[in-house]
């Protein structure tokens, strides 16, 4: 991936670390400070250890309003497949601190459950409550506005999705993410705007080249009866896939990701 490293520059620090406990002390919130100190102990624990949950329970006992502890407990339940408990805990975290947790809940609703409407509601609510950039999803693959556009596309509001994609891509000082132009290109393709779709796929190649993107190029050229370009991009897509240059997520499949067999059978 050509530009994987640059996107890390745009991610909020909290995506990679626990809260700064001293920040609570600075604000005079000694209960959250003490809870935070207790919660720091989970750094040495495995998420599925009993002690992990017990440590966070201790933090909540110290300060029942310590949102971070609820979020971390929720994450472990999400990874274990206990989605009902995850929902209860993440909702509590959101109630206590929406700025830290609402975007995270939105991303989880999209990524793990394909709850497109729920994700849209969370992202739009967050946007309405803050006066700053709402930021990226937890793994850094997409800005939350791009996630919102993907969700609108998935519920067949394609033109609205296209506008959201374009607005975000044209935002001052915004750098396109690893898959932004690809997702916009797929949406254009789905409304049969092949000219703009191809422009997006070509732009995507300049930023980050991967098999799924080249596959859609071959589909366009096939539709246009351009046999040489169709063959060229099909072979390129298969080669990139064999080199593991494809859309990837450690937990789930990306929206609009393509299987090797799908490319081969095209």
Image (spheres, helix red, strand yellow):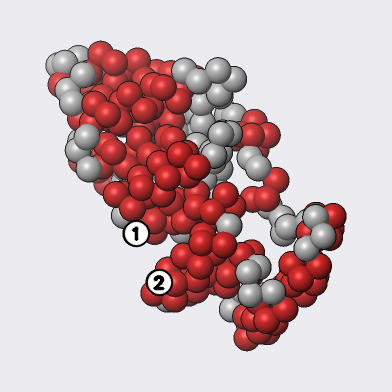
Residue 85's quadrant in the figure?
Answer: bottom left
Q: CB atoms at circles 2 and 1 under 8 Å apart?
A: yes
Q: Within 10 Å of the Cα at label 1, are there few (<14), some (14-19), or many (20+) other Cα atoms? A: few
Label total for image? 2
Q: Position of residue 121 (x, y in %)?
A: 36, 47
Residue 181's quadrant in the figure?
Answer: top left
67, above or below 246, in the image: below
Residue 202's quadrant in the figure?
Answer: top left
Q: Is residue 8 visible?
A: yes
76, above or below 248, in the image: below
The residue under the point 52% across, 45% down is: 137
133, above or below 84, in the image: above
Most extreme residue toward the front is: 28
Q: Which residue is mark 1?
A: 113
The residue under the point 50% across, 20% down is: 171
The residue closer to the viewer here, 212 or 14, is: 14
The residue closer to the viewer here, 246 or 175, is: 175
Q: Determine which of the numbered discs, if any, sits on residue 83 in the image.
A: 2
| Left or right, 180 with reference to 37 | left
The residue under the point 64% across, 31% down is: 6
């Amino acid at each position: 991936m050509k530009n994987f490293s640059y996107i890390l520059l745009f991610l909020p620090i909290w995506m990679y670390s626990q809260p700064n406990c001293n920040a609570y002390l600075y604000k005079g919130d000694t209960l959250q400070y003490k809870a935070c100190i207790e919660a720091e102990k989970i750094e040495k624990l495995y998420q599925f250890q009993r002690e992990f949950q017990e440590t966070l329970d201790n933090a909540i006992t110290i300060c029942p309003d310590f949102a971070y502890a609820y979020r971390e407990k929720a994450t472990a339940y999400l990874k274990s497949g206990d989605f009902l408990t995850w929902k209860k805990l993440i909702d509590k975290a959101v109630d206590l601190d929406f700025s830290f947790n609402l975007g995270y809940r939105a991303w989880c609703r999209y990524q793990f459950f394909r709850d497109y409407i729920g994700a849209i509601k969370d992202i739009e609510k967050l946007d309405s409550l803050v006066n700053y950039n709402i930021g990226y999803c937890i793994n850094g693959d997409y800005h939350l506005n791009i996630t919102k556009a993907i969700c609108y596309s998935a519920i067949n509001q394609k033109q609205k999705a296209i506008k959201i994609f374009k607005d975000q891509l044209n935002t001052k000082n915004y750098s396109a993410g690893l898959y932004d132009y690809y997702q916009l290109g797929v949406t254009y393709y789905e409304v049969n705007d092949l000219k703009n779709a191809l422009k997006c796929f070509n732009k995507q190649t300049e930023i980050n080249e991967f098999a799924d993107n080249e596959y859609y190029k071959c589909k366009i050229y096939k539709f246009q009866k351009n046999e040489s370009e169709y063959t060229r991009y099909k072979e390129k897509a298969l080669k990139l896939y064999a080199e593991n240059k494809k859309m990837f997520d450690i937990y789930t499949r990306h929206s609009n990701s393509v299987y090797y067999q799908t490319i081969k059978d095209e």
